[in-house]
Image: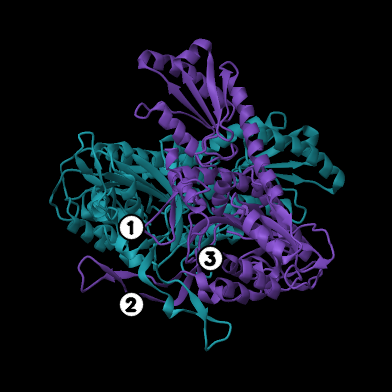
Chain colours: A purple, B cyan
Amino acid sequence: MSKEITSREKDYSQWYNDLIIKGGLADYTAVRGCMVIKPYGFALWENMRDVLDKMFKDTGHQNAYFPLFVPKSLFEAEEKNAEGFAKECAVVTHYRLKTDPNNKGKLIVDPEAKLEEELVVRPTSEAIIWSTYKGWIQSYRDLPILINQWANVVRWEMRTRLFLRTAEFLWQEGHTAHATKKEAVEEAERMLEVYADFAENYMAMPVIRGLKSPNERFAGAEETYCIEALMQDGKALQAGTSHFLGQNFAKAFDVKFSDKENKLEYVWATSWGVSTRLIGALVMAHSDDDGLILPPKIAPLQVVIVPIFKGDEQKAMIDNKVNAIVSELKDLGIRVKYDDNENTRPGWKFAQYEMQGVPVRIAIGARDLENNVAEVARRDTKVKTTVDINGISFYVKELLDEIQLHIYNKAKQYTEDHITLANTWEEFIDLLDNKTGFISAHWDGTPETEEKIKELTKATIRCIPLNNPLEDGKCILTGNPSTQRVLFARAY
Amino acid sequence: MSKEITSREKDYSQWYNDLIIKGGLADYTAVRGCMVIKPYGFALWENMRDVLDKMFKDTGHQNAYFPLFVPKSLFEAEEKNAEGFAKECAVVTHYRLKTDPNNKGKLIVDPEAKLEEELVVRPTSEAIIWSTYKGWIQSYRDLPILINQWANVVRWEMRTRLFLRTAEFLWQEGHTAHATKKEAVEEAERMLEVYADFAENYMAMPVIRGLKSPNERFAGAEETYCIEALMQDGKALQAGTSHFLGQNFAKAFDVKFSDKENKLEYVWATSWGVSTRLIGALVMAHSDDDGLILPPKIAPLQVVIVPIFKGDEQKAMIDNKVNAIVSELKDLGIRVKYDDNENTRPGWKFAQYEMQGVPVRIAIGARDLENNVAEVARRDTKVKTTVDINGISFYVKELLDEIQLHIYNKAKQYTEDHITLANTWEEFIDLLDNKTGFISAHWDGTPETEEKIKELTKATIRCIPLNNPLEDGKCILTGNPSTQRVLFARAY
């Protein structure tokens, strides 16, 4: 089974697709650019969603649900936002089909059912939400509003890739309203920290926290905070963004509140989101040529137990022992499966669970029973250990923590090894092409230079790290004076 | 606050809207026919969803996610299904907007970005899912497939009502594939029972389990099972459906499997769904003229505690006591809030939580503290009891169970009192107009008669109850022979 996976060295991009499809995470569909998230992939997303949802609630947010459709006149109200998304909008123009008079059994769009105003399928929900907040906010007593929604959004992409870039994707989007600028900025920063915490402590994926340059900001934002992660091919991936929106949407939708002095002021806003794209990041951050490597904290299945036996008698003895282990593991809150399917052989199962990235595999044979031991194999390092069955559940629980930490440390080391200083254009090009990763270099701070560098190298400014030290220097491209280094990379 | 609610007697429909909007469950939006589900309403939906999701998983189902869009050629493949939904489809025809050359700052649909094939926004997902299953099913070993998805769907309704009938709504849809007809029928029946269990034991809403007549069947189904509930105005509401789809979709999408004898057979299918419409049913089944009455098992908030005090010293003493109670209640898994907001007065809070249907309210004043008691008020009967603070958490826990049961029994009694036999057309009309509720009457079994009765009375056959006793009789309208009574009602 694992033989079928293309190696990273041979074709990184095919390796990624193999993992997604053969690992059972997702698949293509008959709809251009849209995927189906299969049960195993969706279970992974559910685990990620549940952790994030709790983090949002613990920071005072509530969930709500706003409409899928945005009337064009609302969509265009915040001009920069509209301009940013106009080119990738799916547009509903009609509300009825009818029988094709020339073609029995076929349907055509009913020209008489044309909408007076077209509806945009939300690419993001600031417009529809702020048009609704207008009715909810009169006084400072109505603030803050701290709302999140889990939803599908559509951005018409010409070149799509499973999880990383699909026409429809699932995400959460927080939309908050505040009485002061200070509060809104604090909120945007707080949610960036929530994302970073989630990425590092659950996905085991180290991230750089930073600010986007103006060119890379969210359309309609005053400031975009981001977390950036490094994939195994040395390309960066934007894993989450949190926007300080200033009063832009309040002004576009005329949302004012009377403050404690009874003065009318525009409301301050933030929005922040992460999406199913994170699954793509997760896959590329940790996996190897034999398949997925999933961090235990969010793996759909943490432990699989495979029996090795001949005949019913051995099977019954193993069953007996395994049932006890399963129930011990479940009592410890561990997600475990006993795979005693007799249609497939142990070797096939081993390869299958390896491909699917199940963190721990336990194999038990008749000989093991005699010695009251089992073989415990960890997916990340492939190390196998013979473990006494008494106490095996505690052993496994600790092992899961160790795997979580080991995966993180490995990725952390890789990331640290791939943040490299470049002081000349030649160095910069050489690093981009040969070493890859983040390149820390001086930039003169102008959008034109950033654009030019992108044109020449396909590298973009991934972020200006938070708490970036100031340092006098010369722009890598123009030689103009610069006050700080920023992180460049080629990116997904 | 509660004064603002229109009474049921005065205007039932306005009463319903008042509860939804003033209770903070949902609100209208700028998008025709689409609502926003507000945090309180969404918390209710989350509780319902979590219970259902566990029930689905406990019966062997997994979640997945399929595309929002259905290409027209797939949509029309199963002809009856297509015909059934064609008239209410939102259709995406373009994938881009552009700047209006004649109107600065405005956008128009880019005529050059017309899709080659129109995309239907899913009104239900059989077509897209069965076109995907085709790639997943080859052999009997690939069956059964037991998948559910939580999703938004769009059905373009001309007359909408919050929760009951909106253009976009949230639901779950199960889609299963089986090797035999028997298995598929069993699945459809199993899921109907899951829905009935949920409605009765969590929503405290008694339901009739039955089969739809051919006229009322889901478009594309061989048999539609349903649960029907009775609202306080005597109208019925379809609360959930489970469809045995036969091989209709397998034939439309050419989904065959090789059975154990290596013979190719079409796959058997079911689908089943419940939606946010259940929230409308919940509201109408239990609430009164002072506001919502929510069953404790799914209420977002089960207990609210309101302090009554003068001055900081009293407040501090109450806080101290309440904090202990809150932590006791939380330890018992009870959702509790201590509302010590000083901007609103106790009387206002009482009315507010009454309107929002919080099952139990605890009020504690300074005098109560002296006696170590608190006032416990239940929302359903409005009975208030003075309770010793020692052990109050256990008292409340039992009270919540009692309220759950009481709400159910009340609705059960109402439903039983409103199933009435009619033996003549005059009786039938009189019951419909004056007593309302379900009317059990003979029907000659023809679609024409059913249609005619609907035309004359607006009543439809809600269902043929499961295990309906056979009984010779004469059709209420035509006098033709009939073998069983069926349940008629006017319905939502």
- Mark 2 and mark 1: Cα distance apart in space: 41 Å
Are dots 2 and 1 on a single chain?
A: no
Chain bearing mark 3:
A
Give x and y (percent) for residue A416.
Answer: 71, 48
Does dot 3 land on a helix, a strand or a loop? loop
Up/down of A364 relative to B20, above or below: above
Q: Nearer the viewer, residue A16 or A299?
A: A16
User: Which label sits in the foreground, 3 or 1?
Assistant: 3
Chain of the residue on which disc 1 is drawn: B
Q: Quadrant of the N terminus of chain B?
A: bottom right
Q: Tell me if A477 is positioned left or right of B168 in this view.
A: right
Of pointers 2 and 3, the one earlier in the residue sequence: 2
Task: Say left or right for B140 vs A288.
Answer: left
Residue position for label 3: A123
Mark 1 sits on what residue? B433
Up-down relation of residue A248 to residue B332 (above or below)? below
Q: Is residue B111 above or below residue B447?
A: below
Secondary structure found at label 2: helix
Q: Is residue A19 visible?
A: yes
In percent of width and height, residue A491 lies at 60, 59
**Residue A102: horizontal and vertical position, in percent?**
20, 74
Determine crowd level at label 2: few under 14, some 14-19, many 20+ residues with C-alpha closer than 10 A. Answer: few
**Numbered-mark total:** 3
Three-letter code, disc 1: Asp
As drawn, is B429 to the left or to the right of A482?
Answer: left
Q: Which residue is mark 2?
A: A111
Q: Residue at x 21, y 61 (%)?
A: B452
Type of amino acid under label 3: Pro
Q: Residues within 10 Å of mark 3 (few under 14, many from 20)?
A: many
